[in-house]
Image (cartoon, helix red, strand yellow):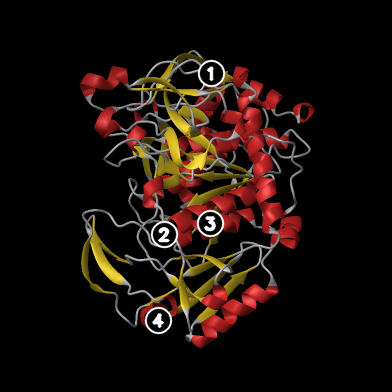
């Protein structure tokens, strides 16, 4: 069977990765194939309309699938391919447009014309490949991405645990309950009853006893929490408060506190490109829980993604926008470099134009009012707000005529800039949470994504229709933000109006709610 190369399917290897031999031929793996959707021209037109800020009537989940699902003939072509190479079809998902296959490494080497290797990097061993995948000619144009052959972690959680207090610096530090931050940002006095908030998790686990104790201490009812495991991913806590459990409980405790009476659904998947997109698709196409807003506190620098994976994920983000689902994503905790050497980089999926990218501030308040708010920048060890200019995405219409303040001066913004919005993220002014039975203070833009998701859930509960894809309206409501004009994230400085550190600024919740009211749609 003749094969053709699938462009952009090789994931870049870190410079210091070391090959230690071939992957075991009998190792069983479950890659994910992303398939083309029907009516691709109409799909592209819909995405373009969103990015120009044109009026858009959100599709239901059912309408999206009926209009843009995968053709039965394409699934049948994949079935024939799988049968030829002795691979099992574990799951086919018409809504998400994917097929999950299962088989041995040796079978996938033959099926995709690759040689999977084992590599060592960062103290761990993982599976990967140094060249593009090859697909049979019969699948050319049908299969748009093959994910999961490489099992490296694709993303990191953007939270930072504050170190223990140092007596000499106690007067420089403060911490808040999430409800305190919501009050400082003047969130509307409403619950989020009837709303479902999705939280994407790529590790760790949920402890109900921690949540119950935490919300009892806050004096508010604990939210209803559901847990969804994608393809058998673990949902058990690891027992390390500073590990992925910290991300899970931070998400639950912030979203649950600022969006009272919302239903929270945790979608767990393996930390790989295949796992990440499956967790996200699980939330987007969930016809039982129907989240109106999705919070993502995980991400990775744009250069760390295989082009095919970034493209496939961006298409999934576009699908969410077309269905009127708001997606909030953390912009990163490593300043303008996003932890990479050799210049400034932004974090994906926050850099997608279909995402509300959430940057970080240092928030100080007293007597129920904000006394100071600047860009979060705690230096090399303390972290800093992510932000900058995308190398992957064009300038959306709603960011035209903006500029960035860089080390070299002020320049026009020529590509997608992030973040869009911001909120309290500095661990030195962080959030009091409970993880694995331990009380601690946590910051990071991981906290800002669920904070904004909770605000949007409150707003959705006040309206007949969800706010949905709101980026264009956000940029038309600058008066609803606390403009941050002091500080830097390394490569970019805060200025009046939008900047590549804190976006438009932190929210004035009541004004945001008014701007997104039905009368302004």
Q: Is residue 322 visible?
A: no
Q: Is residue 395 visible?
A: yes
Callout 3–callout 4 Cβ contact below 8 Å = no
The residue located at (25%, 20%) in the rendering is 169
According to the image, label 2 marks what residue? 272
* Relative height, residue 71 to residue 344 (above, below): below
Image spot of residue 485 (x, y percent): 44, 16
Image spot of residue 6 (x, y percent): 46, 66
Marked residue nearer the N-terminal end (3 or 4): 4
Marked residue nearer the N-terminal end (4 or 2): 4
According to the image, label 4 marks what residue? 110
Marked residue nearer the N-terminal end (2 or 1): 2
- Quarter residue 344 falls in: top left
Image spot of residue 27 (x, y percent): 35, 78
Marked residue nearer the N-terminal end (3 or 2): 2
Q: Dot 2: few (<14), some (14–19), or many (≥20) neighbours within 10 Å?
A: some
Marked residue nearer the N-terminal end (3 or 1): 3
What element does badge 2 sit on? Answer: loop
Distance from disc 1 to disc 4, alpha carbons, whole Å, reads: 56 Å
What element does badge 3 sit on? Answer: helix
Distance from disc 3 to disc 2, alpha carbons, whole Å, reads: 14 Å
Q: Dot 4: few (<14), some (14–19), or many (≥20) neighbours within 10 Å?
A: few
Query: Which is more toward the observer, 346 or 436?
Result: 346
Q: Quadrant of the C terminus?
A: top right
Q: Dot 1: few (<14), some (14–19), or many (≥20) neighbours within 10 Å?
A: some
Image spot of residue 418 (x, y percent): 48, 33
Marked residue nearer the N-terminal end (1 or 4): 4
According to the image, label 3 marks what residue? 312
Q: Nearer the viewer, mark 4 or mark 2?
A: 4
What element does badge 4 sit on? Answer: helix
Distance from disc 3 to disc 4, alpha carbons, whole Å, reads: 24 Å
According to the image, label 1 marks what residue? 482
């Amino acid at each position: 069977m003749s094969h053709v190369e699938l462009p952009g399917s090789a994931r870049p290897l870190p410079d210091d990765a070391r090959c230690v031999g071939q992957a075991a031929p009998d190792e069983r793996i479950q890659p994910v194939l992303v398939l083309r959707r029907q009516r691709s021209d109409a799909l592209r037109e819909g995405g373009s309309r969103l990015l120009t800020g044109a009026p858009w009537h959100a599709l239901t989940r059912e309408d999206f699938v009926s209009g843009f699902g995968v053709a039965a003939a394409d699934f049948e072509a994949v079935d024939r391919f799988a049968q030829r190479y002795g691979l099992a079809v574990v799951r086919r998902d018409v809504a998400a447009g994917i097929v999950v296959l299962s088989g041995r490494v040796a079978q996938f080497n033959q099926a995709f014309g690759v040689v999977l290797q084992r590599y060592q990097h960062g103290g761990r061993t993982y599976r990967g490949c140094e060249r593009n995948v090859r697909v049979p000619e019969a699948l050319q144009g049908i299969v748009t991405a093959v994910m999961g052959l490489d099992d490296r972690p694709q993303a990191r959680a953007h939270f930072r645990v504050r170190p223990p207090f140092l007596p000499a610096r106690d007067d420089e530090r403060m911490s808040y309950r999430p409800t305190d931050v919501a009050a400082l940002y003047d969130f509307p006095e409403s619950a989020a009853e009837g709303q479902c908030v999705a939280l994407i998790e790529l590790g760790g686990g949920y402890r109900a006893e921690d949540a119950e104790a935490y919300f009892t201490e806050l004096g508010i009812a604990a939210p209803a929490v559901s847990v969804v495991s994608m393809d058998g991913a673990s949902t058990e806590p690891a027992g390390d408060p500073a590990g992925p459990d910290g991300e899970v409980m931070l998400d639950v405790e912030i979203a649950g506190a600022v969006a009272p009476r919302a239903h929270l659904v945790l979608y767990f998947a393996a930390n790989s490109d295949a796992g990440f997109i499956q967790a996200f698709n699980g939330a987007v196409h969930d016809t039982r829980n129907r989240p109106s807003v999705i919070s993502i506190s995980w991400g990775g620098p744009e250069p760390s993604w295989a082009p095919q994976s970034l493209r496939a994920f961006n298409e999934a983000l576009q699908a969410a926008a077309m269905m009127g689902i708001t997606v909030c994503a953390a912009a990163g905790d490593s300043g303008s470099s996003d932890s990479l050497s050799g210049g400034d980089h932004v974090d994906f999926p926050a850099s997608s134009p279909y995402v509300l990218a959430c940057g970080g501030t240092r928030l100080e308040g007293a007597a129920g009012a904000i006394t100071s708010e600047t860009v979060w920048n705690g230096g090399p060890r303390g972290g800093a707000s992510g932000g900058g200019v995308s190398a992957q995405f064009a300038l959306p219409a709603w960011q035209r005529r903006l500029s960035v303040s860089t080390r070299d001066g002020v320049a026009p913004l020529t590509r997608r800039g992030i973040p869009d919005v911001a909120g309290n993220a500095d661990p030195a002014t962080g959030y009091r949470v409970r993880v694995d039975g331990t009380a601690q203070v946590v910051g990071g833009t991981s906290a800002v994504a669920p904070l904004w998701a909770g605000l949007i859930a409150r707003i959705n509960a006040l309206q007949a229709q969800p706010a949905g894809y709101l980026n264009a309206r956000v940029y038309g409501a600058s008066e609803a933000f606390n403009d941050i004009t002091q500080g830097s994230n390394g490569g970019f400085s805060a200025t009046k109006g939008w900047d590549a550190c804190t976006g438009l600024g932190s929210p004035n919740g009541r004004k945001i709610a008014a701007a997104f009211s039905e009368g302004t749609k």
